[in-house]
Amino acid sequence: MTRRVGLLGGSFNPAHRGHRSITLAAVRRLALDEAWWLVSPGNPLKPAAGMAPFAARLASARAMARRAPIRASDLEARLGTRYTADTLRKLVRRHRRIRFVWIMGADNLAQFHRWRQWRTIARTMPIAVVARPGYDGAALAGPAMAWLRRFRRPASHAEHWAEWSVPALVLLRFRPDPTSATAIRAADPDWAELHRADPLARAAASTHI
Ligand SMILES: Nc1ncnc2c1ncn2[C@@H]1O[C@H](COP(=O)(O)OP(=O)(O)OP(=O)(O)O)[C@@H](O)[C@H]1O
Ligand SMILES: O=C(O)c1ccc[n+]([C@@H]2O[C@H](COP(=O)([O-])O)[C@@H](O)[C@H]2O)c1
């Protein structure tokens, strides 16, 4: 049977309840079997300074995904990919019986035109963008949306994403969640430093999809 999987890529520096709440809402709205959180070894557009080690971010994602249909994965580290286009190409090739949808917050749509091969990503699988307080205007007015808007599908049809030809884009609006990792780090500036030497976090970095 074909499985329906949503992919949420992220730095998870750290993972927070916003990730969990938007993912659970997307699982319902997109009628997913599960979601995979792809913990990035290093977002190509973000500075390494202030980024906790991969193992600590993965452990934080695993903890936040507990008792939910969410798998926090080290797939990109194992594949050796940093660019989403490369990850998705390999993933689709590897899992022919799974239908994938790419999920991202509106802040990422606002920057999407800066991602490597972003149009190729849009041609690889449908994209579901989740509204995020403070970013929706910029996302809708951005250069990526200027191209993507012609492929927009109504949110009321979201559960039919697996039948859509690509590119396809759906904008989802759940109860807005203002949580951000930036705010969490500001409240706890030691987050990255505390986890730098945490052997438990390193040990947790070995579950496979
Ligand atoms: N509160 C939220 N509402 C909607 N989307 C979110 C929210 N938090 C995170 N996301 C989305 O989850 C994915 C991973 O986010 P990420 O790990 O960068 O967290 P973040 O809170 O955006 O971190 P930072 O503040 O460090 O940029 C991205 O697609 C992001 O847009
Ligand atoms: O492929 C790219 O060029 C690219 C540029 C910026 C971000 N991304 C991906 O976007 C996802 C969200 O990243 P972040 O840091 O905003 O959580 C994560 O999977 C990154 O690898 C990908």
Image (cartoon, rainbow, N blue to C red):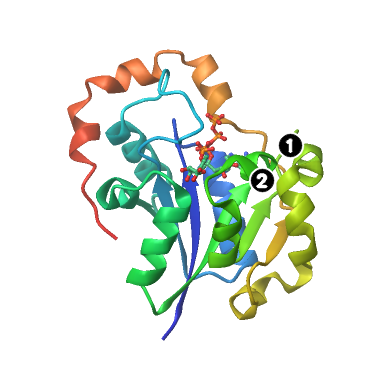
| Residue type highlighted by circle 1 | Tyr
Residue at disc 1, secondary structure: loop
The answer to whether the beta carbon of the residue marked 1 is less than 8 Å from any atom of ligand 1 is: yes
Residue at 58% in and 76% down: 162
The quarter of the picture where residue 157 lies is bottom right
CA distance separating discs 1 and 2: 9 Å
Q: Are marks 1 and 2 in contact (CB under 8 Å)?
A: yes
Identify the disc placed on residue 135: 1
The amino acid marked with disc number 2 is Leu
Instruction: Write down the residue under mark 2.
Output: 109
Residue lying at 31% horizontally and 48% vertically, measured from the top left? 74
Mark yes or no: residue 144 visible: yes
Crowd rating for badge 2 (residues with CA inside 10 Å; few <14, some 14–19, many 20+): many
Residue at the spot 21% in from the left edge and 34% down from the top edge: 202
Determine whether 159 is above or below 41 in the image.
Answer: below
> From where the camera sits, is residue 175 visible?
no
Residue 121 lies left or right of residue 157; in this view the side is left
